[in-house]
Structure formats: C-alpha cells, structure tokens
Amino acid sequence: MASHWEEFYKTHLPPTDFEDNRSLLKEFCERHNSTGERIALVTSGGTTVPLEHNTVRFVDNFSAGTRGAASAEYFLEQGYAVIFMHRTKSLEPFTRHFNGQKFMDMLELHDRGPNTTITVKPDSVDVLAPVLANYKAAQETGKILYVTFTTVSDYFWLLRAACECLGPLGPKALLYLAAAVSDFYIPSSELPTHKIQSSVGAPTISLQLVPKLLAPLVSLWVPQAFVVSFKLETDENILIAKARDSLNKYKHKLVVGNMLQTRRQKVVFVTPESSYEVLLSREQMINGMEIEDLIVSNVVISHSNFLASFKY
Ligand code: PMT
C-alpha cells in the first residue's frame, strides 16, 4: 500500500515550472559537487493551501522568510553554495535589507531632463556597499540558486527534486528546513474548480493532515546528509519535548526550536545527546547582530564535526 506521502504525489500534479527548476537544481548540484564544495539547501517562508483550483482564496501562515533569507547569507559567508528554496514574494537574501521604502529613501534624484541621474545618498553608501558586494560575489561565482514555491504541493515537488540532486553529495549536503509548511490541506480531488461563490452561503471546509516529508527525506532521499529541521511553538512548556519527539521519530541530526514570540532573540538546539540555548546578548542586539549569524555558525560547526566523523 502506498504511504501517505506517496499518495500525496500521486494525487497532486507538479507545478508548471517544475522541469525547469529540476534542471537548474541538477546543474547547480553537479557543478558544486565536482569541486568538492558543501551545499546548503535552505527552505524559507510559508506554503499556501488553495481553496479552489483556479485559486482566488487560500490558507496561509505568518512566515515572512526572515530566518531563511538571513541564514542563506550567513551560509554563503561560511563558504557554502546555497539553494534558496523559498515562497514566492517572501524575503530574499540581500534585498531583504532594503525592503519597502528603505531602498527609495537611500537614493537621490538629480533631475536634469535628458541627463537625469540617480545616486546613492552619501550616508547610505556604507549600508548599501557591503550588501551589494556580497550580492555581486554570490551572483558572479554562481554560489546561489533561487527556486520558488507557493502552494504546499509545489513545495513537495521541489523538495523531493532538490533531494534527488543533493543525494550524490552524501554528508556534504546540509538541509536547513526553515520553511513553515502547512500542516493541513484540502486534497486536490475535493477542490472546486472555480471561485467559491458567497451567494451559496458560507462553505464548510474540511482539512486533512499533510504528510511530514521529514520521514522519506531522512530515510530514503538523502540518508547521508546533515539534516536540520525547525520546530515552532507558542507554548514554551512543550517546545523541547516536541523537538525531541521529532528527532526520535525521524532520526536526523538537529532540531532548532523557536517560540513565535521570541524567535528573533532566542532558539534552542536539540540534538540526540543534549539541548542548549543560542541567544543574542543585549549588546549584540544593540549592535544589530542577527540571531541567524549565531544559528548558522553553530550549525556549521556541527556539520563539520559530522563530516569529520563520517566514515566514507
Ligand atoms: O520566516 P520567519 O518569519 O523568519 O519565521 C521562521 C520560522 C519560525 C517559520 C522558522 O524558524 C521555523 O520554525 N520553521 C518551522 C516551523 C514548524 O514548526 O514546522 P513543523 O513543525 O510543521 O515542521 C517540522 C519540520 O519539518 C520543519 O523543519 C519543516 O520545514 C519540515 N516539514 C514540515 C511539514 C512537512 N509536510 N514537511 C516538512 O518537511
């Protein structure tokens, strides 16, 4: 009998850009594998659950993609090639620093008719220059690949394809699963084709459980990779226990636990042997340090130890 996750693939078609993304993933992984580099797959942002095939409405979640976008930059700094698999229109590495009006406010317009020019305000150069330099370096060296998903079904197809391409890297592949994946969905076969009409009254929507992909991912797709999952809770009393349950169930390397309310200042690392907090000090916060800098540094140390102990 097909398992829950296999059934999901059988009943949900791949996204229209799937083959293009699969080719990009394959080329990226082969190129970096051939030079012996480590690759980090960073998933980021929330998935949607459509309520109609021709989707006007959908169920979404809070995730902005800050964790994933910031972490991708720190992995690049640490020398990793990065697959940034993110929700369409969620935050992206580099551009995240200048979201909304911030970018416009950094520019000056010198309106001289046909000779109009735009310059960066002198006091913004120090802010923009290092980010721009890192962005250019990542682009020019081909160290980052951007792939996007919107629905939970897109995420499923893309994650499995990425794993297929990462498999040959063995323990050099690091999976950093920071995306907030929908836990409940409406099976494709139960979705109406067209926009639900309000004139027929309020619909009753029945949701089903989304299969957890950590199970096939760890045991079948990338069994040698270093897999880091995340666990978000709103009740501090259950966070570590839930993270430990996840480790026991899926047998991967590390769960990073975080609370919705304090996730920008504090996380807890839960490994099969221990649990410890990673948090920003007051001084680090005042200096503008980001917790993802600490999370990624700790993850990279664990990945290096894992690689050192790995028997080829
Ligand atoms: O984007 P931000 O606003 O910065 O917020 C970051 C975050 C809080 C979303 C992030 O730090 C985080 O905690 N993400 C995981 C949220 C969560 O609790 O996931 P989960 O318990 O549903 O899933 C556990 C793990 O399995 C996650 O790593 C998830 O990516 C993965 N998963 C989940 C469901 C599923 N069907 N397949 C999966 O692979």
Image (tube, grey):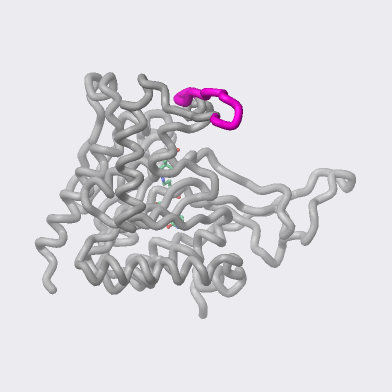
The location of residue 89, given as percent across then percent down, is 54, 45
The residue at the point 53 percent across, 56 percent down is: 149
When asked about the image quadrant of residue 18, the answer is bottom right
The location of residue 304, given as percent across then percent down, is 15, 55
In the figure, 217 relative to 286: above or below? Answer: below
In the figure, 184 relative to 288: above or below? Answer: below
Quadrant in the picture for the C terminus = bottom left
Left or right position of 272 against 185? left
Residue most toward the bottom? 1
The residue at the point 39 percent across, 71 percent down is: 26
| Residue 266 covered by magenta stretch | no
Left or right position of 106 against 48? left
Q: Nearer the viewer, residue 179 or 166?
A: 166
Q: Is residue 245 in view?
A: no
Q: Is residue 66 in view?
A: yes
Q: Nearer the viewer, residue 180 or 5?
A: 180
In the figure, 185 relative to 66: above or below? Answer: below
Q: Which residues are magenta?
A: 105-115
When asked about the image quadrant of residue 131, the answer is top left
The residue at the point 52 percent across, 52 percent down is: 183
Q: Nearer the viewer, residue 29 or 140?
A: 140
